[in-house]
């Protein structure tokens, strides 16, 4: 299915911005962060990466729906029970950032499954497939970035919460079920990133979180 020129251009722009930001990770975590204060710099970087990923997640969902053929609008209206909840749990910065990292890991597992299923359904040249692959990388980088913030804020605490059980599909899904599942995963992924963005903005707005760690 041919993507609209506006959608393709917007997706390409977001992808290029993500590449630039991810390539800058080393400098931000190194000398640049030391110059500004490591904690504040890492938090700034994580916030901007999350904002960019949230925009890309919206674009990915639009591309996904456009690639599903007839009745695609219906796929996102049906409930799916085994998709992670798009929420952050816990009390205090330590628990909540641990929750973010753990839930990002869960969503990455689900995006991997969606990618594998869509590879069997889509033409190999469909840009959706490359965007799904890229999303896996972005999730990994964001989890690492937030883990670095967590380590800076709480250097004597492990960054990992109790390891969640990895996702394993319980049974084979037919094509219709795969399309519903994929939309539920990508919708949840987008919504969760918006929650993460608000969480990081609150940390930056409070200011005191990094005052003793700069």
Image (cartoon, helix red, strand yellow):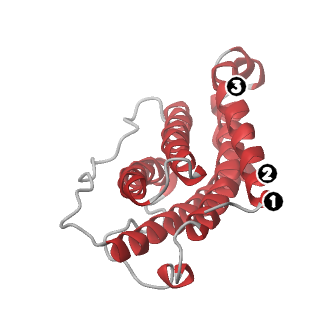
> How many residues crowd around disc 2 within 10 Å: few (fewer than 14), some, or many (20 or more)?
few
Q: Of marks 2 and 3, which one's residue comes earlier in the chain?
A: 2
* Rendering quarter of residue 208: top right
Q: Check the image and report above or below for 213 versus 72.
A: above
Labels 3 & 1 near each other (Cβ < 8 A): no
**Quarter of the image where one finds residue 175:** bottom left
Q: Is residue 207 visible in the rendered structure shown here?
A: no
Separation of marks 2 and 3 at Cα, in angstroms: 23 Å
| CA distance for labels 1 and 2 | 5 Å
Q: Which one is closest to the eye, mark 2 or mark 3?
A: 2
Which is more toward the observer, 200 or 60?
A: 60
- Residue receiving disc 3: 24
Image position of 159 with respect to 60: above or below: above
Q: Residue at the location (75% across, 59% down)? A: 7
| Frontmost residue, 87 versus 167 | 167
Disc assigned to residue 6: 1
Horizontally, residue 73 falls left or right of residue 2, namely left
Mark 3 Cα shell of 10 Å, populated few (<14), some (14-19), many (≥20): few
Above or below, 139 relative to 25:
below
Query: In what element is the residue under mark 2?
Result: helix
């Amino acid at each position: 299915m041919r993507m609209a020129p506006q959608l393709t251009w917007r997706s390409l722009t977001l992808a290029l911005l993500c590449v630039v930001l991810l390539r800058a990770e080393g400098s931000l975590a190194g000398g640049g962060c030391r110059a500004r204060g490591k904690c504040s710099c890492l938090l700034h970087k994580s916030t901007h990466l999350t904002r960019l990923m949230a925009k890309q997640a919206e674009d990915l969902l639009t591309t996904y729906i456009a690639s599903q053929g007839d009745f695609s609008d219906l796929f996102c209206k049906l409930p799916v029970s085994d998709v992670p909840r798009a929420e952050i749990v816990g009390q205090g910065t330590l628990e909540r950032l641990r929750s973010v990292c753990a839930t990002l890991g869960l969503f990455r597992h689900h995006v991997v499954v969606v990618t594998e299923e869509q590879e069997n359904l889509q033409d190999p040249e469909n840009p959706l497939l490359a965007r799904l692959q890229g999303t896996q990388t972005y999730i990994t980088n964001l989890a690492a970035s937030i883990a670095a913030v967590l380590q800076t804020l709480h250097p004597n605490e492990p960054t990992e919460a109790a390891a969640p059980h990895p996702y394993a599909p319980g049974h084979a899904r037919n094509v219709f079920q795969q399309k519903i599942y994929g939309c539920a995963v990508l919708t949840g992924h987008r919504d969760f990133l918006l929650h993460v963005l608000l969480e990081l903005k609150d940390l930056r707005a409070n200011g005191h979180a990094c005052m003793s760690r700069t």
